[in-house]
């Protein structure tokens, strides 16, 4: 794994934004790194919507929000002096995405953490950066935590957890 | 098109004409569907008897989207759940989570568990307006928790004489939930009100699968926590709380000494460390219970993990192999 290949796994949360800013401030001005900002799509739960149309609408709104976040992340990194060609945006759609039905690479949706680690392994990323919300133990047990799972399952790479 | 009275009188000639209401193929306006109306679902006629009610703390809360009905052609009692998209916060101890009702999810599970006695049975069909109506068989019997509460035995007798059989059946209920998880589903609302003891068969039957949530990294966690809560109830023969701590061996001198660590992960007044008040609870079973306490460092991530620990405890209680 190449430690200078950095994967920042994000959602559109403040914690993810902090992780991006941390990397930007730490590596700003350096040209030796390749940075990928990754989002694994988790579309709105279809069961929550009365029909396809309202589900697709919610999916589109979510995608717009995420893609805006990803562009802001790239601007943040380049704004700190990281060359634009060193920053890649990666949006991995869900396999049953209402807005990206024809995607070639997609997430089957059982675990975001495992999807992140699969991208990390396949892309030879030696450094993985992820934000952390600071969940209680009860929340972690009941709902799970992507960050905790990533730190437990990560192999052959360094994980930076930004809180 | 016939009216409601014509339909009813075909099957029940004695039904008073003035009590007959509307004949409906569209259930969208469920608030106005009431006694005497007939719901026509693809040629099956359901006479509406009343709204279902949820009872808790002695208060009856009407569920206007759930209708107690009689299927006119068979005379069988049915429950019709009409479409009601509701989104509401659910408090779980100190936490609050957003929960949704999903007819689509419940309909899918009804298909998945057809013929499986561990779950309520029924089918779904879209009405003329595309609303997914679920037609459910009535589970005849009692809430399991009420049945347990009514058992006339002191706790020690209950624990050794009755609990092993109860836990055997509960283990089957756990396997039923595991079956859902292995098919990518979950129950979504495991609590005392949703596990019934069926009259006649003695089966434990899960009801109501329409709660759902947004994506979670641990999609089975809520269900497993619900199973843990039920287990606390079954082992304690009630929920032991700070307000009703039993003191079976209180000698008037040394009282039970409890700490925050002895209580539930989410319900801060609910005792998880039952061995402190019932010393004959084997350590192995108490360890299972303590997985749901606020000091637990590990949690069960699958039902199989829970069962792996729980099943040997049943034999241990049966053998009366008690370590104090």
Image (cartoon, coloured by chain):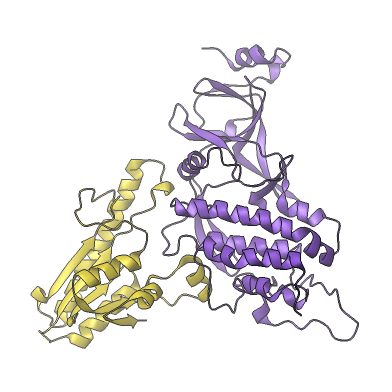
Q: In front: B276, or B107?
A: B276
Vertical side of B290 occupied by B132: above or below = above
Image quadrant where residue B129 sits: top left
**Tint of chain A:** yellow
Q: Nearer the viewer, residue B43 or B235?
A: B235
Q: Quadrant of the C terminus of chain A?
A: bottom left
Residue A52 percent across, percent down from the top left: 34, 41
Q: Residue at x 47, y 28 (%)?
A: B127
Residue B144, placed above or below residue B45? below
Q: Residue at x 48, y 54 (%)?
A: B181
Chain B: what color? purple
Q: In which quadrant will I find the N terminus of chain A?
A: bottom left
Residue B130: horizontal and vertical position, in percent? Answer: 43, 32
Residue B59 in the image: state x and y as whole percent: 73, 50
Residue B1 in the figure: left or right of residue B73: left
Is residue B305 visible to us here? Answer: yes
Q: Nearer the viewer, residue B313 or A163?
A: B313
Quadrant of the image occupied by residue B260: bottom right
Residue B200 lies, in percent from the top left, at: 74, 39
Badge count = 0
B191 up-or-down from B116: above or below: below
Please state if B142 lies on the left or on the right of A24 as rendered. right
User: Dividing the picture into quarters, in which one does residue B230 lie?
Assistant: bottom right
Residue under the image location 24 percent in, 68 percent down: A119
């Amino acid at each position: 794994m190449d430690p200078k290949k950095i994967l920042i796994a994000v959602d559109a949360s403040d914690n993810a934004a902090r992780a991006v800013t941390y990397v930007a401030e730490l590596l700003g001005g350096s040209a030796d790194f390749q940075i990928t900002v990754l989002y694994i799509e988790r579309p709105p739960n279809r069961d929550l919507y009365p029909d396809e149309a309202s589900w697709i609408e919610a999916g589109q709104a979510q995608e717009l929000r995420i893609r805006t976040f990803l562009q802001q992340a790239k601007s943040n990194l380049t704004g700190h002096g990281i060359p634009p060609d060193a920053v890649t945006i990666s949006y991995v759609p869900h396999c049953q995405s209402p807005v990206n039905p024809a995607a070639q690479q997609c997430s089957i949706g059982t675990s975001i953490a495992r999807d992140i680690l699969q991208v990390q392994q396949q892309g030879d990323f030696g450094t993985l950066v992820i934000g952390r919300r600071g969940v209680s133990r009860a929340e972690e047990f009941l709902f799970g935590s992507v960050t905790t799972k990533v730190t437990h399952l990560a192999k052959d790479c360094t994980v930076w957890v930004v809180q | 098109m016939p009216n409601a009275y014509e339909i009813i009188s075909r099957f029940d000639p004695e039904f008073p004409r003035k009590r007959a209401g509307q004949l409906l193929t569209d259930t969208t306006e469920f608030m106005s569907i009431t006694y005497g109306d007939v719901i026509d679902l693809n040629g099956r006629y359901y006479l509406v008897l009343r709204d279902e009610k949820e009872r808790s703390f002695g208060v009856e809360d009407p569920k206007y989207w759930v209708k107690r009905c009689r299927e006119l052609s068979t005379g069988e009692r049915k429950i019709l759940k009409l479409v009601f998209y509701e989104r509401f916060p659910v408090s779980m101890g100190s936490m609050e989570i957003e929960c949704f009702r999903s007819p689509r999810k419940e309909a899918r599970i009804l298909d998945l568990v057809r013929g499986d006695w561990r779950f309520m049975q029924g089918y779904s069909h879209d009405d003329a307006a595309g609303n997914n109506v679920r037609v459910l068989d009535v589970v005849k019997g009692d809430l399991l928790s009420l049945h347990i509460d009514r058992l006339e035995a002191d706790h020690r007798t209950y624990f050794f004489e009755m609990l092993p059989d109860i836990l055997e059946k509960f283990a089957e209920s756990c396997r039923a939930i595991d079956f859902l998880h292995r098919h990518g589903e979950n129950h979504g609302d495991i609590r005392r009100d949703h596990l019934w003891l069926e009259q006649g068969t003695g089966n434990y039957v899960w009801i109501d699968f329409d709660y759902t949530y947004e994506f979670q990294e641990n999609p089975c966690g809520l269900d497993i926590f619900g199973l843990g809560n039920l287990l606390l109830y079954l082992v304690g023969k009630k929920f032991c709380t700070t307000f009703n701590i039993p003191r079976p061996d209180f000698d008037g001198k040394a009282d039970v000494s409890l700490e925050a660590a002895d209580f539930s992960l989410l319900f801060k007044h609910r005792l998880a460390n039952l061995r402190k008040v019932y010393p004959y609870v084997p350590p192995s079973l108490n360890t299972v219970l303590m997985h749901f306490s606020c000091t637990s460092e590990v949690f069960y991530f699958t039902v199989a993990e829970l069962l792996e620990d729980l099943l040997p405890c049943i034999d241990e209680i049966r053998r009366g192999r008690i370590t104090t």
